[in-house]
Amino acid sequence: MAQKMVTSFRRSLSFPNPPSKPQKALHVRSISLPTLPHPIISHLKDKIAELKTWRLGSESGSRTLTWLCDGLNRLKSIHESLDDLLFLPQSRESLRCGKYFYLTEKLLEDFLRLVDVYGMFQMLVLRLKSEYSAAQIAVRRKDDYKIAAHSKNLNKIAKEISKLIPNVISNGKLTLDPAGPPYEYDDEAELIEVINDVVKVTVLVSVALFGGISGSLAFRRTSTFMGLILGKNTSKNVTVEVGIRKFQEINLENYKKMHELEDCIVEIEGCGEKAFRSLINTRVSLLNVVTQ
């Protein structure tokens, strides 16, 4: 009888254990979920405000390569924070089922257009780097015919980069429509607003990037065409850059400094690639919110 009691006792211990573990895990998970507004939103707002302050550097004559790459790195950090925010269950539920869910699709369209623009920019930078390397060889060999041909091609690529600007400034126009559902600034409205602010600062940095490269004297004979390219699409709040200082100091007639510009192109390519990847990740996360 004693052995049977021991056997029964052992079995009684083995059965309750499996269900008790998931119950404990569920309890821990439930108390770990924060409620909106989440600290990530405050952190994201601070980063956005800092990036807007970064933009003022171009007005004080600090439009340098370091300044531009700093802006791209800041933008990358903002998109990474937004990506974290989009993984929160509360954020996903609000964007999918909240009263402003109809705006999520519009934000998704903005991110899709931005990804497309940055994809085109990366291809143009590759062409720019290749063409500039060929121009260096022509200058070293003092081949005037090829120098003229490569200069023309660089000018053409710069124009193509400048044409990306109207495509990018058309984003970030979303507003919470008071004429729609009863407007009340709450956690859901704040979430939509902060995502739209990320789109706006992406536009801000992109204009500085595209305009800074395409308006540089190293690639163009003149930068006055920029206003003609933009026309009525130019927003009063968007100022087009007229060239990065380092690029302005170098041209195809100064062979000794041409390698410096090549290094600049490589650095911009790297910073732009990182920002591009973070933008893709954000777009994928937002798409998952809508489709899953």
Image (tube, helix red, strand yellow):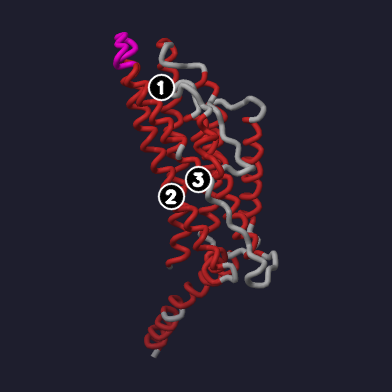
Residue at 49% over, 76% down = 20
**Residue at 52% from the left image edge and 33% from the top image edge:** 226
Mark 1 Cα within 10 Å, few/some/many (few <14, many 20+)?
A: some
In the rendered structure, does residue 69 fall within the stretch colored magenta? no
**With 11 as the anchor, is 53 left or right in this view?**
right
Report the mark closest to the observer, 3 or 2: 3
Distance from label 3 to label 2 (Cα)?
15 Å
The residues colored magenta run 138-147
Is label 3 in contact with label 1 (beta carbons under 8 Å)?
no
Asked if residue 253 lies left or right of residue 242, the reply is left
Q: Which mark is residue 280?
A: 2
x and y, in percent, of residue 76 in the image:
51, 43
Horizontal and vertical percent for residue 245? 55, 22
Identify the residue at horizontal 50%, vertical 37% (top origin): 229
Q: x and y percent of residue 240 in the render?
A: 57, 35
Residue at image coords 52%, 71%: 26
In the rendered view, would you say 30 is above or below 153? below
* Residue type, mark 3 in image: Val
**Badge 2, how many Cα within 10 Å: few under 14, some, many 20+?**
many
